[in-house]
Amino acid sequence: MKTSIISYGLKKQGATKEYPFGPEAMVLKVGGKMFALIFEGAEDEFRLNLKCDPVIAENLREQHEAVRPGYHMNKKHWNTVMVDGSLPLTDIFDMINHSYDLVVGKLPKSVRESMLEMK
C-alpha cells in the first residue's frame, strides 16, 4: 500500500520529491510547495500528512480514527493519515487529490500556466 500511495502522489502533474527533513520523511511538492509529507518508517507505522480545508479536516477526524491533526504541522490545515488498513486506498487517494488541488490553487497564475504547458 505504501508504494501505491507514493507512486500516486508522484504521478500528479508537476510533483517532485525531496528529503529536506532526513531520509525517513519524503516531501512531495508542486510548484515548490509541499502537498504531502510521507513518513517512510516501518510498514505498520506508515503515515502521511496532507493539507486539507479546515472544515473537511475536522469532519474527516470525526469520521475516521486513522485521521488525526497534522503531526508537527498547522493542525487547522493539515491532517496526519495513519495508513493502517482502516481506510480504503481510494479514500487516501481522494485526500491526496484534495491536498494537491489546494496547493495548486494557491500557486501563482504563471506557475499554474507553465504546469499546463507541461502536459
Image (cartoon, rainbow, N blue to C red):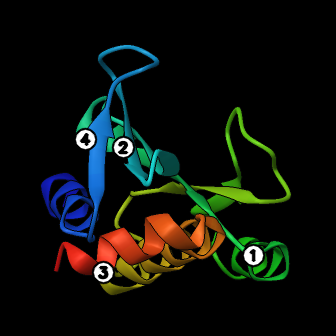
**Quadrant of the drawing holding the C terminus:** bottom left
Q: Residue 43 bears which disc, if any?
A: 4
Q: Residue 101 bears which disc, if any?
A: none
- Do residues under tags 4 and 2 come within 8 Å of each other at their CB atoms? yes
Identify the secondary structure beneath mark 2. loop
How far is the residue under mark 2 from the one under mark 3? 32 Å
Q: Residues within 10 Å of mark 3 (few under 14, many from 20)?
A: few
Q: Residue 116 bears which disc, if any?
A: 3
- Count of labels shown? 4
How far is the residue under mark 4 from the one under mark 1? 27 Å
Instruction: Return the residue at label 2.
Output: 46
Q: Position of residue 23 (x, y in %)?
A: 29, 17
Q: Residue at x 85, y 81 (%)?
A: 55
Q: Sequence order check: which comes first, mark 2 or mark 1?
A: 2
Q: Picture quarter containing residue 20?
A: top left
Instruction: Return the residue at label 1.
Output: 53
